[in-house]
Amino acid sequence: MWTAVLTASALAFALKFLGYVVPAGWLEGPRTSRVTSALPIALLSALVAVQTLTGEGGALVVDARLAAVLVAMTALALRAPFLLVVTLAAVTAALLRAAGWG
């Protein structure tokens, strides 16, 4: 276990260090700018999809979480405040789970 922790720490340090030694010209291109601005969105979307649709043992599950995410997406599309988006999603999941669909 400690070997994995130390290896991950060394890799994280190496990546941080490489960020300081890479020439600035490599990071200023239009393609690099597009990729670095879109990468967090893609990673967060993938995380939400995996956490929403994955159940026991990695099986695909459709339950109250998916409905809550769909409600949140709709509220975001309608430009609702973030606190309202989170509240609507939580209430949706709670009501569906209370109704037995969970």
Image: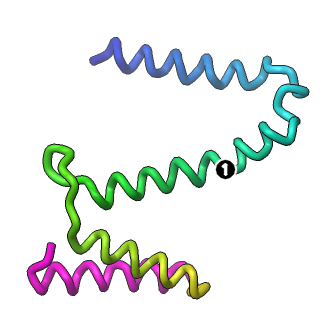
**Residue closest to the eye, 85 or 56:** 56
What's the colour scheme?
A: rainbow
**Residue closest to the eye, 19 or 1:** 19
Residue, far right: 25
Question: Amino acid under label 1?
Answer: Ala
Label 1 crowd bin: few (<14), some (14–19), many (20+), radius 10 Å: few
* Residue numbers of the magenta segment: 81-102
**Viewed as shown, does residue 55 lie left or right of 5?**
left
SS assignment at label 1: helix
The quadrant of the picture occupied by the N terminus is top left
**84 up-or-down from 56: above or below:** below
The quadrant of the picture occupied by the C terminus is bottom left
**Viewed as shown, does residue 68 lie left or right of 7?**
left
**4 up-or-down from 67: above or below:** above
Q: Which residue is found at the position 71% from the left and 49% from the top?
A: 37
Main SS of the magenta segment? helix
User: Circle 1 sits on which residue?
Assistant: 38
